Amino acid sequence: MLLQRLNEYAERLDVPPAMYKSTAVPWVIDLDATGQLLGLVRTTGEAKRDQGKLLTVPYPGTRTAGIKANLLVDKAEYVLGLERDNKSVSRHEAFLGLVRECAESTGERDVQAVLHFLETLDLTTVDLPAELTPDLWITFRVAGSFPTDLPSVQDYWASRFKEAGAAKEQDKMNCIVCGAGCVPVSPHPGNIKGIPNGQTSGMALISANSKAFESYGLERSVIAPTCGTCAEKYVIAANTLIKDEHTHLRVGPLIYLFWTREDTGFSVTLLSKPEPDDVKALIESAWKGREYSAVDETAFYATAFSASGARVAVRDWLETTLGSVRKNLARWFVLQQIVDSWGGEGHPYGLYPLCASLYRDANRDMVPNVPKTVLRAALHGGPLPMWLLYQAVRRNRAEQGVTRPRIALIKMVLLSGVEGKEDTMKELEIENTNPAYLCGRLFAELEAVQRAAMPNVNTTIADRFFGTASSAPASVFGRLLRGAQNHLGKLRRERPGTYHALQQRLEEIQSKLSVFPTALPLKDQGMFALGYYHQRASDRAGAKAAKDKTQVQE
């Protein structure tokens, strides 16, 4: 199904001719109509990353250790015979032979001009630039035009691969993409590039490179028989999606590709760099009702790729409708809504910050299943699994505290399985009597007492006791409350206003706690973290409001 959908997408693109692709070509040999050399032109600019002018040129397929020339454009060691090793002469002869065959087949004067230049080439009489090395790509321009653009040359190049297939007529099978009878192409033309941690030259999506992956005697790409046209199309489609920032998303070891059956303007930037106004508009549109649109029934596709050796591994596949995606995505953003650390309206998170919050070094440690699970909930809906909550509270204990993206993920896990509660627990809930939530609030206030009494303290109670307090409150809160009395006594003498505010909040919380729980199960550890975060944010907001009020009065 994935290959069929990619091929459908490719049909909407301006696909190059068969066995052609867009390639950066840094050098051009200019010839006149008779094949006389006019000069060598460098197409790169001043920028270090400029690899040359992008041209749509013939593509030779995957080139291994053997000699395999490309038509009219290739590395300088093929085109001019520049020496790199003892095979340079053989490479140049292969290139010359291919040009000769093309000239005879097409009868094109421009190709014959190139052939004349190559047959009379004497490198000792050509002033080659020092920057032109054997590994750089070079092509020809005859009287201002590229021979590779000629329709007859394009047809000739495509026919070579069709003839190669016809020679194996006894191996004919049905293409798994279009269903037509064909001789399966092997290897598939072109590689998929841009996969995280993958080979820069690109990797194959379909390839059995060892006996373990073969079946029924089928080898290499023939394990999934595909005609040359379909194989070329799905590679072009995948690479096009990867190049466009609106249709791909990188998260840890995964890259997600998104597209719709028809062009709808949907952009994946909502999941990578969500703008508050865009998220607000999405939520209002999906949750507050709007007129039905036929666009909502447009098919929506998403797939996840990762590197697996020299191949591309498909980690996930999703097929739904755009309307469903918008509704689920709106709920996903509502679930993560929570005040910022100062009690203000927090900004929305994309996929990466939420997933990265579970790791000390996300770039090194993130496993594919984390972004896969969180993104599936965003697009497909449904509850987030408890193992995400386990990882979040474990990270809380390791860091002895919480961060906003991690607390947002905790809130999402706790509420995603409860319909109608999505927009709750955004900020401090005074009426919430959950013991774990109250313990988290109390712990935040005890830390505030310590900070008020000892502004320059290096190690707070959170640095020492967060893990224990969030999992076994009864074992530590008695000691923390006794220790706070000395700090409260100091505040009563030196800062009575602060003392009364803190004492009042401590009494309010403790009045709702009849007993400290001996142990907190996983969900309650999440509630503890929420209570702790909410209380700290509320305290900061209150302090800021009081300070602003004082400044206005002055």
Image: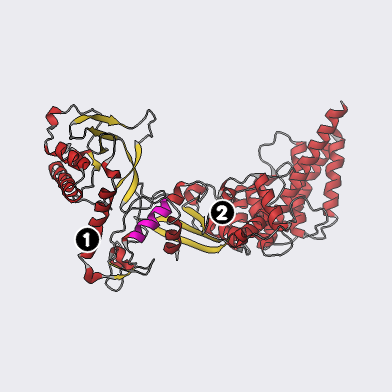
The answer to which of marks 2 and 1 sits earlier in the sequence is: 1
Magenta span of residues: 229-239
Across and down, in percent, residue 245 comes to: 50, 46
Please, what is the three-letter code of the amino acid marked with disc 2?
Answer: Thr
Above or below 554: residue 265: below
Disc 2 and disc 1 in contact, CB within 8 angstroms: no
Of residues 545 and 460, the one nearer the viewer is 545
Task: Tell me where residue 231 appears, x and y as whole percent.
Answer: 35, 59
Residue 204's disc number: none
Residue carrying label 2: 264
Going 46% across and 57% down the picture, which residue do you hit?
9
**Residue 264 on image: x %, y %:** 56, 54
Label 2 neighbourhood size at 10 Å, few (<14), some (14-19), many (20+)? few
Query: Which residue is under mark 1?
Result: 163
Q: Is residue 93 left or right of residue 336?
A: left
354 or 375, nearer to the observer: 375
Point 39% across, 30% down: residue: 47
- Please say whether residue 483 is visible from this viewpoint: no
Q: Is residue 58 above or below residue 134?
A: below
